[in-house]
Amino acid sequence: MIAYVEEKGWDIDFYVGCVYNRTRTVDEWKQVLNGEALEMSQEMAAGRLSETEMEQAYQTAFESLKPTNGVFVGIFPRIKDEITENVERLRRVLNLGLKTMRKNHSIPRRTFLGAGLAAAGGAAISCGRGGARSPFRFFTAEEGATVDAICEALIPEDHHPGGHQAGVVNYIDIQLTRHFKKYQRSYRHGIAAVDTASRARFGKRFTDAVPGERAAVLATVEANSKEFFDLILAHTRQGFYGDPRHGGNRHMASWKMVGLPYPPVRGRMHYEEWPR
Amino acid sequence: MKFFEAESGRLVPGTNASYGFSHCTNPYSAAMRDYYMPKKVCDVMHQANRFDINAFNYGLRSASATRKECYRAVNPLAMYKQGEKVDRALQNGEMDELKEWCKKARDLGVVVGVGTH
């Protein structure tokens, strides 16, 4: 097909090829991709491939592609966090390391949608965002930073990741647009109360306070706004120890800490396989 | 990677899963369809966006929607004809129609591509 289009000189900008092909071999694809292909589709066989095979599939795809080429990959994050998994796999294959995967600034909605590719006849996708400059859904950037700092103060990093590294704020942020909607007002007021307490005591925002000062501020909040303190403490625990598919526990930080095997597919794990 | 006017990640979530085509079994596909309600599609896009994944491959599964309607709905950067349809057009000698589709897509001001399976 590519040969036909090239031969006829069509006014085309890019090609999309699929590795999951009934007729082409990997070598044939490598030959094709020496041309001007810009995109490449990849099928991971709906989870039928083993982890090793998927790693090899990524390896083959990215070895065959130019650095300016991309890969389509199906994502079905219902049981496990396939988004993180795919990103980690990609970074392993590209030797980029696993840190700094998560971006700390947002892509403006306009760019986000504008960069969308529509297959033959695209579909309407409209995604709202809490604040234009916020990387969060519910929190403003400042609120998110404060909650992140509170989570880290409640579960500080030691030789294991703390609340910040485990991305607990993402869990709370996501859930505040879902099951925790009823707590939105509590958070708005509670976060403001934390900052007010911090300013009153140390003359600076909570995020600017050092760990000892943060602990003192939270002790004040616990005494004066017990309801909010208990709420965010409970949510921090949930976000730290819960399933990553709910937005927290990044890289299964707490599960690795307690030695919980992954993935925890319900009904599939035998008792003997669990750690004693 | 640089994709014409845009800068996008090299990992692009594909469209099949979002409309419940699992390439596996019917129950698996049904589970995908149940999971991927429109709001969930947006949720997953936002989750992906947190890892710098900012480009998405998406297909409208409505036979009634015209190319223009699709364009108005999504305002995409690029449009391409899906690979199996292109392969079938080539096999059936219908490439002129496909070429016409590409021209009309170009007239909408988007980057144009063709796929192959």
Image (tube, rainbow, N blue to C red):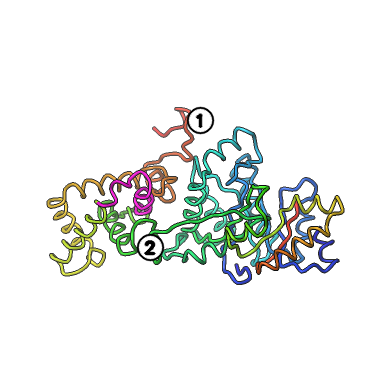
Which residues fall within the magenta stretch? A166-185
Q: Is residue A104 left or right of residue B82?
A: left
Q: Residues within 10 Å of mark 2 (few under 14, many from 20)?
A: some
Front disc: 1 or 2: 2
User: Closer to the N terminus: mark 1 or mark 2?
Assistant: 2
Tell me what residue is drawn at x 57 percent, y 68 percent: B7
Q: Amino acid at mark 1?
A: Arg
Please tell me whether residue A172 belongs to the stretch shown in magenta. Answer: yes
The residue tagged 2 is A131
**Who is closer to the viewer here, A261 or A18?**
A18
Tell me what residue is drawn at x 35 percent, y 43 percent: A179
Q: Residues within 10 Å of mark 1 (few under 14, many from 20)?
A: few
Please tell me whether residue B64 belongs to the stretch shown in magenta. Answer: no
Residue A236 visible to the viewer? yes
Give the quarter of the figure containing the C terminus of chain A. top left
What count of labels does the image hold? Answer: 2
Q: Amino acid at mark 2?
A: Gly
Q: Percent x, y for residue A51?
A: 59, 44
Give the quarter of the figure containing the N terminus of chain A. bottom right
Q: Chain of mark 2?
A: A
Q: Chain of mark 1?
A: A
- Report the predominant secondary structure element of the magenta stretch: helix
Q: Percent x, y for residue A41?
A: 67, 54
